[in-house]
Amino acid sequence: MKHKIRKAIMADREAIRYMFYETVLAVDKTLYTEEQLQKWAAVYADVTKWEQKLAGDYYLIATNDADKIIGFCSLQNNGCIDMLYTHPAHQNQGVAQALLYALYDVADEKHIAKLFTHASLAATPFFEKNGFVVQQVTDKDLNGSCFAQIVMDKRLWVV
């Protein structure tokens, strides 16, 4: 199965929001409680926030042969990979890897020497496999639920 990577446009907003929602609710139930997953997925409801994020950050999407969004990621100007999600039906098919490699290219174009992320427990193994190193583990409060937030980074080139 092939997938294509392209820059997201505002018209992709609803598909990205829904894919985020579906993906969060499908996250490994051994890592999070149902309450945590519901509060995490509730981020999906804030349309204005998604519009602001799409307008302010650099978003890439992965689409399948039917042009359906199967993954997305975002990069902030400071080098933060804010989001990297693959639809549950398309995980372990190289989608996240392709998105990450595309982000490396974007970072290079923007002269960003180091990337970092606030990874979830579920995403940490993926980032570690791709050379990111854990720098700090903190707690994050999301609507009254506490989440472990793993700060990881990777130097792309030396300045």
Image (cartoon, grey):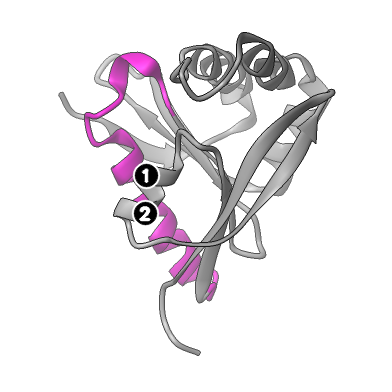
Does residue 79 appear left or right of residue 26 in this picture?
Answer: right
Expressed as whole percent of the image width and height from the top left, the position of residue 80 reads 61, 57
Image quadrant holding the N terminus, namely: top left
Q: Is residue 48 above or below residue 156?
A: above
| Label 1 close to label 2 by CB (< 8 Å) | yes
Which residue position is annotated with label 1? 125
- Amino acid type for the residue under numbered disc 2: Glu
Outermost residue, left side = 1
- x 50%, y 40%: residue: 73
Task: Tell me which corner region of the image, top left, top right, bottom left or bottom right, holds residue 33.
Answer: top right
- Lateral position of residue 149 relative to residue 159, left or right: right
Q: Residues within 10 Å of mark 2 (few under 14, many from 20)?
A: some
Residue type at mark 1 is Pro
Q: Residue at x 22, y 29 (%)?
A: 93
Kindly identify which numbered label has been placed on residue 128: 2
Where 126 falls versus 43 (above or below)? below
Magenta segment, which residues? 86-112
Tell me residue 133's x, y (percent). 44, 63
